[in-house]
Amino acid sequence: MDMSTTARNSGGSQYRRKAPIDPIQRRWYTVPEVAEMLGYGPTKVRMMCITGDLRSLKDGGSRRILPAWVDEYVAMRAAEAEADWP
């Protein structure tokens, strides 16, 4: 699909201009971002990633966490709390 448009410059000749592209949607969170969302410290979130309590992947020297993985963790903790409730 051609995303360009045709326009005229001040001299009257035509040129092709690319249509604006939608900005890239955010796909990953960093450890500090997840820590802030959950109300934990970054060290605790890193340990949760290392132990497997919170899914993550290593990208170079940084850990990256999908939003769905944060949701999984919250759902897991909520289910545990429900099970422990008298």
Image: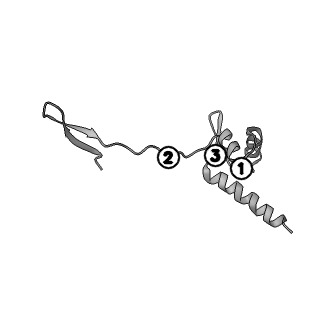
Q: Quadrant of residue 49?
A: top right
Does residue 76 appear to the left or right of 19 in the view shown?
right
The quadrant of the rendering that contains the C terminus is: bottom right
Residue nearest the observer in this picture, 53 or 30? 30
Q: Residues within 10 Å of mark 1 (few under 14, many from 20)?
A: some
**Crowd band around label 2 with a 10 angstrom C-alpha radius: few (<14), some (14–19), many (20+):** few
Give the mark count.
Answer: 3
Look at the image and name its color scheme.
one colour
Question: N-terminal of the two: label 3 or label 2?
Answer: 2
What residue is shown at x 73% (from left), y 39% (from top)?
Answer: 42
Side of 28 where 4 appears, left or right: left
Closer to us: 7 or 73? 7
Q: Amino acid at mark 3?
A: Ile
Q: Are marks 3 and 2 in contact (CB under 8 Å)?
A: no
Q: Nearer the viewer, residue 33 or 62?
A: 33
Residue 66, horizontal then vertical, whole percent:
61, 48
The reply to whether the C-beta atoms of the residues labelled 3 and 1 are less than 8 Å apart is yes
The residue tagged 1 is 54
* Spatial CA span between label 3 and label 1: 8 Å
Where residue 72 appears, x then y in whole percent? 67, 56
Disc 2, SS: loop
Q: Nearer the viewer, mark 2 or mark 1?
A: 2
- Residue that carries the numbered disc 2 in the rendered image: 25
Q: CA distance from mark 2 to mark 1?
A: 22 Å
* Label 3 sits on residue: 65
**Label 1 amino acid?**
Leu
In the drawing, what numbered circle is on residue 22?
Answer: none
